[in-house]
Each structure stands twice: as C-alpha cells, then as structure tokens.
Amino acid sequence: MICISIAGFDPSGGAGILNDIKTFSALGVYGTGVITALTAQNVKRVAGVYPISPDFVAEQIDLVLEDNPIKYGKTGMLFSKDIIKTVAEKTEEYQLKLVVDPVMVAGSGGKLSEEGMASSLKKYLLPQAMLVTPNISEAELLSGLKIETPQDAIDAAYKIGETCNVVVTGGHLDGNNILYDGEIKIIEGELIESDHTHGSGCSFSAATVAFLVKGWDLLESIEKANYFVKESIRHGKWSTLDQFWKMK
Ligand code: PXL
C-alpha cells in the first residue's frame, strides 16, 4: 500500500511532509514525498520560505510515479500559482485521486503562500481533486464567506462544494467536521484543550489518504482520520502513535 504527499518541508517535523510521511507510516501505508518548498520554522514562527522550481517539482513527481503504482495522494503547502498549475497538470496526467489541504498560513501565523492562492487553488487544482480539507480560515478564503457559526460553515461547504467535495474541519468552531459530497454530513467531533495542534490539518488530510488507500470510502476515511487526529492531539507532543499501526 503506497501513496504520495506533495508538500512543503517543516524541519521541526510537526507539520508538512515529515508529518504526512509519519502519519502514513503510523497507519501502515508507505509514503513517498515530493517537496514543493523548504521552510525554516518551528511551532512559534516561520523565519523563511524557499520554494522549489515548478519544473523540479514536476521532475520529482515524474520519477516517483514512473516507478510506483500510486493511485492516491495529497497536497499541502504549494506556495505559488505556478506550482499549483504544475501539480494540477501532473494530477491529470497520472489520474491521481487527490486530497487537497489548502495550506496558506501556518498555525503560528507565518505566511506559507503567495497572494491569490485561494483563487489559483479554485481555478486549477480543486477541479482535479477528490476532496479539499480547509479549516475555518481557509474555508473563508475559498468561499469568500465569513464563518462565525456552524451554519456559516455549512454555507461555505455548499459554496466550495460547487467545485469539489469538501470537508470543513472544525477545530476552530465546535470540533465538528462538515462534509459536503453532494449532501451535507456532520461528522461529530470533540474539542480537546491542547497546545499541541501544530500540523493537525496535515495529519487529518494524510490520514484520510491512508484510509482511502486501505479501501475505505470517502466518508469512512474522513471519520477514521478524525479519530486519528483527535487521539494524536490527546497524546500530545512527540507522540509517535505506534498504537495506530494496526488500525484497519
Ligand atoms: O499545517 C500546515 C502546514 C503545512 N505545510 C507546512 C507547514 C505547515 C504549518 O506550519 O509548515 C510546510
């Protein structure tokens, strides 16, 4: 069982591609990883971003896909319109089933993308994707709606859902996730008081991909990913989640 993450590098290991690969491993799926940007950051701040050229992103994807029968993947930090366009082209070329985590800003508030990312994602990548997983502020940027209540999040899900299946993750609202895949489904969550949420969006999208690879359908994969992230947060800093190896 194998999949791909196309994402940025957070050297502190909490978010980005390191997190994705660790999540795949914890769930028993072999992860390959294509880097879109290097960052210098920790949980508190982003000090620098060093994007990889779109051609080199394409070359990495080609080499991984040339050699491996990969059907499912996810994207994280893509940084620029040109990298988004490249990834969209490759997604179509290889018929990848893609979960898009529309990363724009780090949890610390540091910028992880150029201006205009939301419209580039909507224009080029979401039409190619099987699911997009915005948190509340990303859902605001993608829908153009202000989200203050659970009903606002449902309205945003309808709006984004015009282009792509969407799950609005509820960590900042009431802990519930709102899926729109032709109809609205509320996935009950729980808000856990914790300082250890850096990278939880990466973990959620990566875990969703891992469960899709294992053969679960979209709703089941999202529900299981939700549980995985909740327990990851509960176990806190530096948890390796070895106990999830056997999660089917
Ligand atoms: O959690 C979003 C995210 C994604 N990718 C990279 C990040 C972060 C947040 O810090 O650094 C590389």
Image (tube, grey):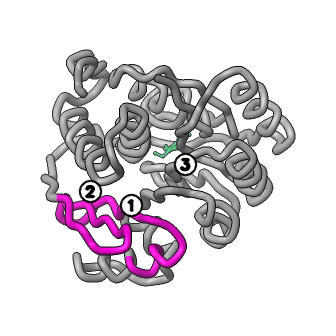
| Circle nearer the viewer, 3 or 1 | 3
- Counting from the top left corner in percent of width and height, residue 216 is at 32, 41
CB under 8 Å between callouts 1 and 2? yes
Q: Which segment did they paint magenta? A: 158-187
User: Circle 1: is it few (<14), some (14-19), or many (20+) Cα within 10 Å?
Assistant: many
| Residue 191: numbered disc | none
Residue matched to label 1: 135
| Residue 171: numbered disc | 2
Q: Quadrant of residue 208?
A: top left
From the image, which quarter does the C terminus lie in?
top left
- The residue positioned 52% from the left and 73% from the top of the image is 142
Judged left or right of residue 189, residue 182 is: right
Q: Is residue 199 above or below residue 20?
A: below
Residue nearest the viewer, comparing 179 with 47: 179
Q: Is residue 12 visible?
A: no
Q: Does the magenta segment cover residue 37?
A: no
**Is label 3 within 8 A of ligand 1 (CB to nearest ligand atom)?**
no
Residue nearest the viewer, comparing 25 with 229: 25
Judged left or right of residue 98, residue 64 is: right
**Is label 1 within 8 A of ligand 1 (CB to nearest ligand atom)?**
no
- Counting from the top left corner in percent of width and height, residue 167 is at 36, 62
Task: Give the SS element for disc 2.
Answer: loop
Q: Is residue 147 visible?
A: yes
- The residue positioned 39% from the left and 82% from the top of the image is 146
> What kind of residue is marked 1?
Asn
> What kind of residue is marked 3?
Leu
Q: Does the magenta segment cover residue 185?
A: yes
User: Circle 2: is it few (<14), some (14-19), or many (20+) Cα within 10 Å?
Assistant: some
| Residue 98: numbered disc | 3
| Circle nearer the viewer, 3 or 2 | 3
